[in-house]
Amino acid sequence: MLYFIRRTKSTKSTPKKRVLKKKKQSSITLISTLVLSLFVRPVGAKEKVNPYEPMFCKNYTLKKLLVNGKKVKQVFFVPDEDVKVLLLGLIHMSKARTKIRIAVYQLTDKDIVNALILAHKRGVILEIITDQSCLYSRYEKITDLRRLGVPIHVYGGKYYSIMHNKFFVFENTLNGKSIVFTGSANATMGGTTRNEENVWIVENQKIIDQYKIKFDTLKKKISLMPRPKSPDIRLSRKLYTRMINKMNDVLALTGIFG
């Protein structure tokens, strides 16, 4: 009998236990609500647009660059305007068998590199000149393009300064127009979104031709980057740089290109 009384008393719900039970149920309800909110969009809520999705970039670029559907707006400033989306839009609008000539000091932005990879896969002809320091960046992605067969010309060696140009020459990209995208911004996350930079959009054919000539002159002075075979490029980055520098030094010593 005593045992039964004790057993009954021990299992009886006390006010303290009831409070703890309510708190536990409230916590479970709150966690469930939070989890559902991650996957379920509220009724009437607008779907979030990916700013780097190809179609969004194309529409944004057409809207921002073309005045009255014809004249090209020429000057932009970072971070006041979304220059990265403009550049991505121009890359995405480039058609198969057209060419993009790129001379950049740094090329580390993954969205820009991914857009270039997509362009290469759909038949756009890419050719890139960069500085040797681009290979040493912890965020470097230039070898991803080279592995796919994109020609990468690396500027460097003891007889050279640095290749500090930043320009993209597009053929037939913006409603059939040829465009030069240039300025102070590198093809990096900081250069296209955060830093104080300027970008100039050129549609004058005479000026575009001068950029093409400069690109070809630079290309003749320096070596083509060896095409990597290893899946882990970072292990052999220093070796590639040494090879490129030696080839560039030989070219400089010949005196053929000044």
Image (cartoon, rainbow, N blue to C red):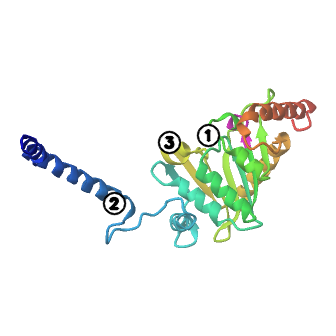
Secondary structure beneath label 3: loop
Taking the view exactly as shown, the residue that stands out farthest to the front is: 1
Q: Residues within 10 Å of mark 3 (few under 14, many from 20)?
A: some
Image quarter hosting the N terminus? top left
Task: Please name the residue that numbered disc 2 is placed on.
Answer: 37
Q: Is residue 173 magenta?
A: no
Secondary structure beneath label 2: helix
Query: Mark on residue 139?
Result: 1
Quarter occupied by residue 164: top right
Image quarter hosting the C terminus? top right
Q: Residues within 10 Å of mark 1 (few under 14, many from 20)?
A: some
Does the residue at mark 2 contact the one at mark 1 (Cβ under 8 Å)?
no
Instruction: Tell which tag, 2 or 3, sits nearer the viewer.
Output: 2
Task: Please name the residue that numbered disc 3 is placed on.
Answer: 195
Give the mark nearest the N terminus, 2 or 1: 2
Query: In the image, what residue type sits under mark 3?
Result: Asn
